[in-house]
């Protein structure tokens, strides 16, 4: 790399003067006969070293080029041209030359005078320009001889080594590195390899410059330097500082890793720990993440920066040396940063804070805590940066990184990188915080959508279980319900929405509400499912519903089983929309699947549903469930239903109790009791049966939402029901009133006679006046007193406000005012109007 000469510290004018003073004389045989002081200054040879020697040795060109130049010189009176001249130290100079013949007295040529024509030299061959370019190059360039001694170093190389060229020239390279210097020894090994093999090489090194503590990335080239005879004279070295590009690549790689390493879960603590583990030791030697307590609880923090005296909770920390954490605040502990500390400034301004050991705020903060001061002193902490964790304009906490083992302090590039990592982590932490809040909200929504406390009714005794597939979220798309109907009847419902999670839960809530609304209208099972099918079809067509449900589940669909049990007739009417049939255990122990006609799933449309009726003796146990309880990874529908029948047939004591569930097995939720299933229910209770069915059919974690509703039927006997057939004669009103009054007296409900007579009179009158035969009056005594009047007309009555001079229109208003509730339902032969009265405990 060296061009020779000592002109790197001289000006262009002096160089030009030496060039113009350089004169050489050569005889006709090509031997140097004269040598000026200018030539010696320019090329480094003394007159004694040059005179008498062949002039060709001064040329750096090959033999062919030299012979061509000599031939041209002999043909011309004056020769002008450019030639490559070799400096004494082996360097090469491109010089413009002028050669004139030297004549004797007979005009014969006895030699030549050669001078330097500086004006004739091309700019790119100007020795001053070439040498100055090397000397002033911004990259480190140096050369050593065959014995590994420094020959030349440019200013950049001297700056890297932290020494002047005069101190290093002539010294062995091995004398300039410390014993045990790994990077220096590595450099020496590569240098010797080039000296030995004569082959150039290139390698990269990551080390500190001797004049700077910062780690640099060096791109190093080494190549052999040869003379005109192709003899290796030394090695040239070029070292390019590639640190900026190297650290830029490292930052990009770190950010790439952050995309997959930070935010792997929706857990605030885990995300904070991922940030600390990624940043240490790449960015700092010790890192901490402190968050607001409100973030840990999932609450919404105040927008903008926070006050400096706020207390933060230590969520994560990581050290390159685990011993550093011995003096740190324990995980879960509280940290209060004083107002002047860098983390406090970071929190109050919402901007990063960079500080070093000598800064006043840094020293004051460290000195206020003896444990922290000892850690800084023992480990040599010298640099700190605090980065705010902010997302959506909200400050969530602060990340603090320190350096001790790494000697270079934090710089602005480190702050930019830390901000990128902290920003990504803050978004993930905020998402985790919002998930915590949304999960709590979703769980509350799920609990509110599922049946919590069933309304009072005496038609069936029941128990239930619900277990979502995503037990951590606690939400799913299955549901069940027990809905009291008029006439002391009860509706039993179980349904399953396609998919899992909050979207399925929301869809389930809509369907459950729709079923309850349609049940209040007292529609038969097949008509109710038809209306529900229309609703699902509309929801599937609605864009908003498609976004909220279909995107999450792949489609909007559901199945449903709707059954109505009448304790008076002991008959159960059922219709299925693609749902599994219920299983029943009769009082004699027989277990069977009810043979109902399955309809299509909800949302298919244009296919009618059919009703199946079955008489159920009092004490029959009916089990309704969703397919999550039946179908498993290694079990199809038929096998699951067979296992359900077998489990339902096993009475308490007939088989050993199931083993205690494994610790990771979720406990089924029992909405009826608003608590998990009892650990030790009564052996013959429906609660015990539910536990047995769940543990038998779901021994492990479910793959689908599972819901179970188990009921035991009750019956109203003849002493609780009285009925009379009436004609369309208005005189029947008084007879009906008298019959009802006598029946109440027989039941010991004389106190209810006044209201009952009024209700009977009004309802029978309306049936005779506006209805059609057959007309029937029925009284039912259970938890309440129910009065029903049926007729053959399907026209339903309605309340209206009677004007002052109207003769009618006030009867139903009186009934509504005097009874707890009233309504109408359609029957196969017409309609039934009913009114329900509350009985006092004494009456009941």
Image (cartoon, helix red, strand yellow):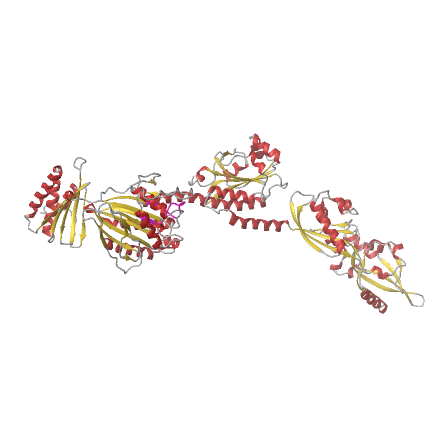
Task: Kindly report the secondary structure that dominates the magenta region of the rendered protein.
Answer: loop
The residue range painted magenta reads 465-479
Asked if residue 115 lies left or right of residue 430, the reply is right
Seen in the picture, residue 350 relative to 18 is either above or below; the reply is: above
Determine the image quadrant of residue 720: top left
The residue sitting at the front extreme is 654
Image position, residue 257 (x, y; %): 54, 49
Image position, residue 21 (x, y; %): 84, 56
Seen in the picture, residue 842 relative to 141 is either above or below; the reply is: above
Image position, residue 746 (x, y; %): 11, 39
The residue sitting at the bottom extreme is 75
Q: Nearer the viewer, residue 361 or 835?
A: 835
Q: Nearer the viewer, residue 75 or 360?
A: 360
Task: Count all numbered tags in the image, as a single digit.
Answer: 0
Image position, residue 521 (x, y; %): 22, 50
The residue sitting at the left extreme is 731
Residue 34: in magenta span: no
Q: Nearer the viewer, residue 566 or 90?
A: 566
Asked if residue 341 lies left or right of residue 571, the reply is right
Q: Quadrant of the N terminus?
A: bottom right
Asked if residue 301 lies left or right of residue 716, the reply is right
Asked if residue 729 can be seen in this view, the reply is: yes
Residue 467: in magenta span: yes
Asked if residue 610 lies left or right of residue 37, the reply is left
Asked if residue 288 can be seen in this view, the reply is: no
Determine the image quadrant of residue 438: top left
| Residue visible at 59% across and 34% down in the picture | 375
Q: Quadrant of the C terminus?
A: top left
Q: Nearer the viewer, residue 380 or 474?
A: 474
């Amino acid at each position: 790399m060296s061009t020779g000469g000592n002109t790197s510290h001289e000006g262009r004018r002096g160089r030009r003067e030496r060039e113009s003073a350089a004169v050489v004389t050569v005889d006709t045989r090509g031997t140097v006969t004269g040598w000026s002081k200018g030539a010696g200054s320019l090329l480094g040879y003394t007159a004694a070293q040059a005179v008498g020697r062949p002039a060709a040795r001064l040329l750096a060109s090959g033999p062919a080029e030299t012979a061509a130049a000599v031939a041209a010189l002999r043909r011309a009176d004056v020769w002008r041209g450019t030639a490559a001249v070799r400096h004494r130290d082996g360097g090469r100079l491109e010089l413009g030359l002028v050669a004139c013949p030297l004549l004797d007295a007979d005009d014969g040529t006895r030699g030549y005078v050669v001078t330097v024509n500086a004006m004739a030299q091309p700019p790119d061959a100007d020795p001053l320009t070439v040498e100055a370019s090397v000397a002033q190059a911004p990259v480190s360039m140096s050369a050593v001889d065959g014995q590994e001694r420094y020959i030349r170093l440019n200013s950049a190389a001297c700056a890297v080594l932290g020494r002047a060229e005069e101190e290093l020239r002539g010294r062995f390279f091995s004398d300039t590195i410390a014993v045990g210097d790994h990077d220096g020894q590595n450099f020496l090994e590569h240098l010797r390899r080039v000296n030995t093999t004569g082959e150039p090489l290139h390698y990269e090194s990551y080390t500190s410059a001797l004049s700077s503590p910062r780690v640099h990335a060096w791109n190093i080239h080494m190549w052999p330097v040869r003379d005109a005879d192709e003899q290796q004279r030394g090695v040239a070295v070029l070292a390019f500082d590639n640190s900026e590009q190297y650290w830029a690549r490292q930052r990009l790689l770190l950010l790439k890793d952050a995309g997959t390493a930070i935010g792997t879960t929706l857990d605030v603590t885990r995300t904070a720990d991922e940030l600390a583990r990624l940043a240490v030791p790449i960015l700092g030697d010790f890192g901490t993440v402190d968050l607001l307590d409100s973030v840990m609880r999932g609450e919404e923090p105040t927008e903008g920066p926070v006050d400096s005296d706020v207390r933060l909770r230590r969520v994560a920390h990581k050290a390159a040396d685990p011993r550093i954490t011995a003096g740190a605040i324990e995980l879960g502990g509280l940290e209060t940063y004083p107002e002047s500390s860098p983390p406090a400034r970071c929190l109050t301004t919402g901007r990063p804070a960079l500080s070093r050991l000598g800064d006043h705020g840094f020293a004051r903060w460290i000195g206020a805590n003896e444990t922290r001061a000892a850690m800084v002193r023992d480990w040599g902490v010298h640099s700190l940066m605090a980065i705010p964790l902010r997302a959506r304009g909200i400050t969530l906490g602060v990340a603090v990184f320190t350096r001790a083992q790494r000697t270079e302090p934090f710089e602005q590039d480190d702050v930019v990188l830390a901000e990128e990592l902290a920003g990504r982590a803050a978004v993930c932490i905020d998402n985790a915080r919002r998930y915590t809040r949304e999960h709590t909200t979703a769980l509350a929504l799920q609990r509110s959508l599922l049946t919590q406390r069933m309304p009072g009714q005496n038609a069936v005794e029941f128990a239930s279980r619900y277990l979502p597939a995503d037990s951590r979220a606690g939400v799913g798309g299955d549901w069940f319900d027990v809905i009291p109907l008029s006439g002391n009847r009860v509706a039993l419902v179980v349904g399953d929405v396609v998919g899992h999670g909050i979207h399925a839960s929301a869809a389930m809530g809509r369907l459950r509400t729709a079923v309850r609304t349609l049940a209040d209208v007292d529609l038969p099972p097949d008509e109710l499912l038809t209306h529900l099918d229309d609703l699902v079809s509309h929801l599937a067509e609605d864009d908003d519903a498609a976004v909220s449900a279909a995107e999450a589940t792949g489609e909007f669909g559901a199945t449903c089983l709707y059954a109505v049990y009448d304790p008076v007739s002991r008959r159960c009417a059922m219709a299925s929309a693609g749902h599994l049939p219920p299983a029943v255990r009769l009082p004699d122990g027989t277990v069977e699947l009810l043979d109902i006609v399955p309809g299509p799933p909800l949302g298919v449309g244009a296919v009618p549903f059919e009703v199946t009726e079955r008489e159920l003796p009092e004490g029959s146990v009916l089990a309704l469930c969703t397919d999550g309880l039946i179908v498993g990874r290694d079990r199809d529908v038929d096998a699951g239903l067979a296992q359900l029948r077998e489990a339902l047939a096993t009475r308490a004591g007939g088989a050993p109790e199931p083993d205690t569930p494994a610790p990771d097995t979720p406990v089924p939720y029992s909405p009826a009791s608003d608590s998990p299933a009892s650990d030790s229910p009564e052996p013959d209770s429906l609660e015990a049966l539910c536990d047995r069915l769940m543990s038998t059919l779901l021994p492990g974690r479910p793959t689908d939402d599972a819901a179970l509703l188990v009921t035991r039927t009750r019956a109203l006997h003849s002493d609780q029901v009285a009925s009379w057939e009436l004609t369309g004669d208005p005189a029947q009103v008084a007879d009906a009133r008298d019959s009802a009054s006598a029946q109440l007296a027989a039941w010991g409900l004389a106190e209810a006679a006044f209201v009952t007579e009024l209700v009977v009179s009004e309802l029978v009158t309306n049936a005779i006046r506006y209805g059609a035969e057959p007309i029937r009056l029925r009284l039912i005594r259970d938890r309440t007193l129910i009065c029903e009047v049926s007729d053959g007309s399907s026209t339903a009555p309605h309340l209206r406000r009677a004007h002052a001079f109207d003769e009618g229109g006030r009867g139903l208003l009186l009934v509504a005012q005097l009874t707890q509730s009233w309504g109408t339902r359609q029957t196969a032969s017409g309609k039934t109007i009913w009114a329900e009265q509350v009985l006092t405990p004494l009456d009941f």
